[in-house]
Image (tube, helix red, strand yellow):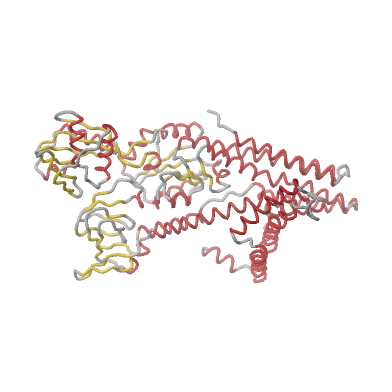
Amino acid sequence: MSSEEAVAVSKRPTWKIRLDEALHNFEDSVLGFGGMTRDIIFLIVSAVAIILSFAAPDVLPFDWAWIAIVLCGLPIVLEAVVALITEFDIKADVLVSLALIASIVIGEYDAAGIVAFIMQIGGFLEEVTVKRSRAGIERLVALTPRTARLVENGVERVVDAKDVPANALVRVLPGETIAVDGVIVSGSSAVDTSVMTGESLPVDVAVGDEVVSGSINQFGSIDIRATHIGEDSSFARMVRLVQSADAGKAKIVRTADAWATWIVVIALSISILCYLITGEIIRSVTVLVVFCPCALVLATPTAIVAAIGNATKHGFLTRQGDALERLAKVTHVAFDKTGTLTHGHPEVVEVFAEQGSREELYKLAARAERRSEHPLGQALVSCYAAEFGEAAEPAEDFELKLGRGVSAQIDGETVLVGNEEMMHEAGISVPPSCLAAAQAHAEQGHTTVFVSKDGVVVGYVALADTVREDSASAVSNLKEIGIKPVLLTGDNEHAANAIASSLGISEVHANCLPADKLSYIEKTERNNQYVCMVGDGVNDAPALRRSFVGVAMGGVGSDIAVDASDIALVNDSVGELRHLIQLSRHTIRTIKVNLTFAMGINILATLLAVLGLLGPVAGALVHNVGSVIVILNSSLLLGWKARK
């Protein structure tokens, strides 16, 4: 509970708090409404009871539907009572309660049971969503570094990460997670920063470079002078961002909830006036039946369920029912780069030979990198094997030079594969043509490694994270329906601008940390523009949670990102985003048509009931016909396709 919520609760009268607790305790102890396992059992039993009410209506001395009414309907009524008495909050639950009571009064038990069952399914799905969100935060917290190697007076000891003092010396061995933010004072290595920046390639670091908590030290041992510790570290701040992001997320007010207060007041007023004027209780009951019908409360959930089914066929797993309602208002789609618009792993994009053939150079580089653990080296080796259908033979005397490259002996010759600094340190001159090509690749966000043999540069290999096949069409399609694409990435400006330019994205924000992405979303939504965030990594979790709608890459994305999202892309194809947004817009139109029809038939039937031209039996018929029409109209969403 936030501090604002705590203050609000403290201001409530004691009798309201006690009544609220008593009603919830009754639900938990008598109905078991608080337990998810019991909810599942209740739903299964209710579904069977509804089926049997039609298949074997005379088996029991009472209608089978009463089982569904008690198990699914009674909790709804109790929740409505709690909201009414403690907060005088009139929402759709009150409408549902009136419809249930009116249906029971006129003997329409099957209708009451079906409505209660459908509404309880929606409540159960919301409860599951909340639990998943909490599980995501728990996973993120579990990633928090627990211990650190503190070095004092030359002696190393393991302590709790939270106990590391400021300015302390912390040692990080290969494979360990960095527990504090700090500056390297000894050693060099390559650090995996994907948790914080989302970038798949490790960053080479040496003395004087800054590192952040949550990053993973891949190779050499490094000593760090701590600058930010404990709750002030970068990773701890990101955890707090995820925990707090949901509090600021705009919540859509369901149309039925928005109308509920007026509908309830009008229905009760007309019913009472009808009785006072005519003196006939049957007319008064009929007014309640037709004015608060199932059609009205089914208008939104049936459309949402059908739309979710449609989205599932197109590779979207909708984790929150109201996500499709919110998506219809989105004006911006913000993409993460690595793993979202790109594949998330490096591939060879060019092999150039200054001397000899391209194949000879490629094989030479692959053999030298055969035993490398660096992602670039592994990518080079795997790309060679994929292109030529054979694995490169390992070289002899392999040596990894951190932050530089590798050296090896191949057929009696010394081969170096690495960056410009490695060549200079070895006294090898890089041809101007190769340097110019490397600069051109750098401007496109590519990484270039030079290959030398016996002191002479014989060519280079360029690697890059390649764009997904459907990314360009996805961006273009979003523009066509009035959505503005934005790139939010932790990568550098060169790489970000190169990808954005190739995809036609004009707004680019590079070097983004989780807080920067969150800041962009909050700033945009303050201008009444709504952002759909599409991402895949742990670093995207705060933005996915805070954005108006969060879409996570379900295949390559982390579990934490998926748990923080509203919708997951099962097949990682962003090409269907246009369909999803257009589906959401059409769903809203369908809901409005359903509500308009339901209200229209309500008004007409109410007028006839007041005039005595429509009795309870005919009212029940209107009650059921309206519901059937709404359900049929919603079902059309199952097969709906966006126009090209």
Residue farthest along the front direction in this orientation: 59
- Is 140 positioned to the left or the right of 358 in the image? right
Q: Position of residue 636 (x, y in %)?
A: 64, 35
Up-down relation of residue 463 to residue 320 (above or below): above
- Is 82 positioned to the left or the right of 325 in the image? right
Q: Position of residue 235 (x, y in %)?
A: 37, 58
**Residue at screen point 64% across, 52% down:** 44
Q: Nearer the viewer, residue 238 or 538?
A: 538
Residue farthest along the right direction in this orientation: 279
**Residue at screen point 55% across, 35% down:** 582
Residue 81 lies in quadrant: bottom right
Q: Position of residue 419 (x, y in %)?
A: 19, 42
Q: Position of residue 177 (x, y in %)?
A: 31, 58
The count of marks equals 0
**Residue at screen point 27% across, 65% down:** 149
- Is 337 positioned to the left or the right of 302 in the image? left
Residue 211 lies in quadrant: bottom left
